[in-house]
Image (cartoon, rainbow, N blue to C red):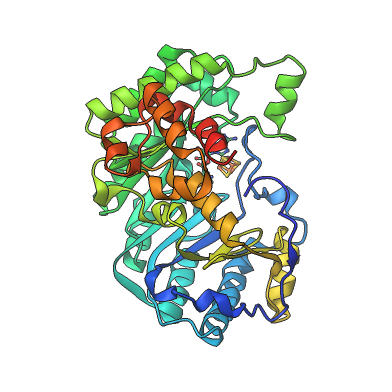
Amino acid sequence: MAGPLPIGEPAPSDGSLPNQVAIDASSRTLHAYLHIPFCRVRCGYCDFNTYTATELDGVSQSTFAQTLIGEIALSARVVSDAGLPKRKLASVFFGGGTPTQLPASDLVAILSALRDAFDFAPGAEITTEANPDNVDVDYLQQLVGGGFNRISFGMQSAVPEVLATLERSHQPANVPSAVTAAKEVGLATSVDLIYGAPGETLEQWRESIEAALSYGTDHISAYSLIVEEGTKLARQIKSGELAEPDEDLQADKYELADQLFAAAGLNWYEVSNWSRNSATASAHNVAYWASQDWWGYGPGAHSHFGGVRWWNAKHPAAYASKVAANESPALGREILSDQTRLEERVLLEIRMSQGLSIDLVKQLNADHAKLISTFIADELIDARAAIGGHLVLTLKGRLLADSLVRQILA
Ligand SMILES: C[S@@+](CC[C@H](N)C(=O)[O-])C[C@H]1O[C@@H](n2cnc3c(N)ncnc32)[C@H](O)[C@@H]1O
Ligand code: SF4
């Protein structure tokens, strides 16, 4: 959860939701995100809402699981009082921060509280993010015993110099051993990569891609490095100590990744995500992109139910004191207009390989016919899919997705 929280109206202290969340709710699936805001050290590029032990000042990691369980109890009450239909959780995602900073028994206890409150739909995807440094077979076995079935490791790069520039603490060799251990205990696996660290060459990026592919994971995410305001990396670039990422080189890196992933049988299903098949795509992330309902638990977490969005107090201490007082930790909320909901759908759905419905473009842009033909002529979208009513990005289009969105919403 990068940057400051949005500005909205204050959220009610009992957490109650407006009636509109119940409209059409049975056509939407239910999901849970749990934010674990702890890291052993902070990586120089990261501005997520996460804290190292020295930054925590009065917040105890050992009571955090109980606090999250308190919010889970509140959510069960709020969901039932809002007149929502009974829905089981279709996916659960522990993110951060580094969820695996907590003992496995804490993650299992939190998951068990969610199961008691909502139950899990058959085949529910239960994922945790992990730093390759702090898991071993015993830890992973406890997760599987508690119901986890997927793990996503922050790998970022296989090249020691690049990891050093990113200020990553893990040893490159820990990634394959962590992935192997995860597979051994039966977890589906994913790794995250970052391309564009200052000084990273195309050859170094190829090395990272090939290493990631050699681990045989079911899924890979590859993110273009974002230089976030206020991070150490941003300061190093500003002072000239490190070079700014080069846009053309970033595009070459994206193309190389797509080509090597596809050759290895991993196909894109979202601009930054590749999977072996639709069953190994991240069901949880797909739910975000399809504007389903999710409750985000933990400090700074965002939730969304049927066009109502709310967000929790950002600091773990402020969050914990609300939950301890039996109050909702939500700080603000926003009730999205129909127009904003349509615009958000464009932003999210255009990034998916299944594409954006051209009907949606028609609703938002009077000049849609001309726009679509220009996109086809410029080879930004697939002509055959467009005839079938879907706007599906080509490789060139994926590199320019934001510009297409701006033109559609102009
Ligand atoms: C919460 S972390 C994953 C788990 C664990 N904290 C770790 O880093 O190993 C989520 C992912 O966000 C990505 N990320 C974080 N900051 C980023 C940035 N500034 N630019 C691009 N990707 C970023 C990284 O790939 C990271 O793996
Ligand atoms: S370990 Fe992950 S969440 Fe923590 S600072 Fe690094 S990238 Fe951010």
Q: How many marks?
A: 0
Residue 324 appears left or right of 196: right
The C terminus appears in which quarter of the rendering?
Answer: top right
Residue found at x 23% / y 25%? 263
Residue 137, position in %: x, y? 34, 51
Residue 13, position in %: x, y? 73, 78
Q: Quadrant of ligand 2?
A: top right
Residue found at x 26% / y 34%? 384
Residue 143 appears left or right of 405: left
Q: Nearer the viewer, residue 198 or 340?
A: 340
Q: Nearer the viewer, residue 77 or 134?
A: 77
Give the image quarter of residue 144. bottom left
Residue found at x 57% / y 15%? 246
Residue 73 appears left or right of 318: left
Residue 409, position in %: x, y? 57, 41
Give the image quarter of residue 326. bottom right
Q: Is residue 77 above or below residue 234?
A: below
Residue 33, position in %: x, y? 50, 61
Q: Is residue 304 above or below residue 325?
A: above
Residue found at x 71% / y 63%? 313
Q: Is residue 180 above or below residue 12?
A: above
Q: Is residue 255 above or below residue 348?
A: above
Q: Is residue 169 visible?
A: no
Q: Is residue 371 visible?
A: yes
Give the image quarter of residue 383. top left
